[in-house]
Amino acid sequence: MEKEKKATLGEKLVEYKAEFKRIQWLTPAELRKKTMTVIGVCIVFLVIIFCYDFIFTEIMSWISRIVA
């Protein structure tokens, strides 16, 4: 079996630099749009979970009043 050559620190840094240049960064407008989408989805889920929690709490309170 042939042993694999381990890359030196300098070679790794050159590889990282080349890879970093290939990244396609978002424009500020795209970033703003995607950020607003994430915040909007979080708010929608927050409202849904709040509603379920409120309804479940009311049902449990109603049941505890009937049982007690």
Image: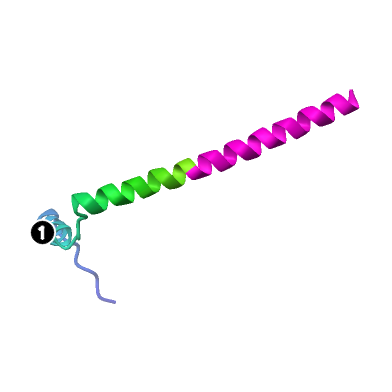
Question: Residue 68 at what x, y percent from top left?
Answer: 89, 22
x and y, in percent, of residue 60 in the image: 77, 32
Q: In this view, does 3 lie to the left or right of 14?
A: right
Query: Which quadrant, please, contains the N terminus?
Result: bottom left
| Residue 66 to residue 36: above or below | above
Q: In the picture, residue 11 is in which quadrant?
A: bottom left
> Which element carries disc 1, helix, strand or loop?
helix
Camera-nearest residue between 25 and 32: 32
Asked if residue 45 is among those painted magenta in the image, a careful observer would answer yes
Image quadrant assignment for residue 21: bottom left
Q: What residue occupies the far right of the structure in this picture?
A: 67
Label 1: how many Cα within 10 Å (few below 14, some 14–19, many 20+): few
Q: Mark 1 points at which residue?
A: 14
In the displayed structure, 1 sits above or below 50; it is below
User: Could you tell whether 2 is left or right of 41 in the image?
Assistant: left
On screen, residue 44 above or below 8? above
Determine the main secondary structure of the stretch shown in magenta.
helix
Residue drawn at the location 14% of the way across and 54% of the way down: 9
- Which residue does the image show at 20% across and 56% down from the upper left? 25
Relative image position of residue 49 (x, y in whole percent): 58, 40
Question: What is the x, y in percent for residue 23?
Answer: 19, 60
22 left or right of 50 in image = left
Residue range of the region highlighted in magenta in the rendering: 44-68
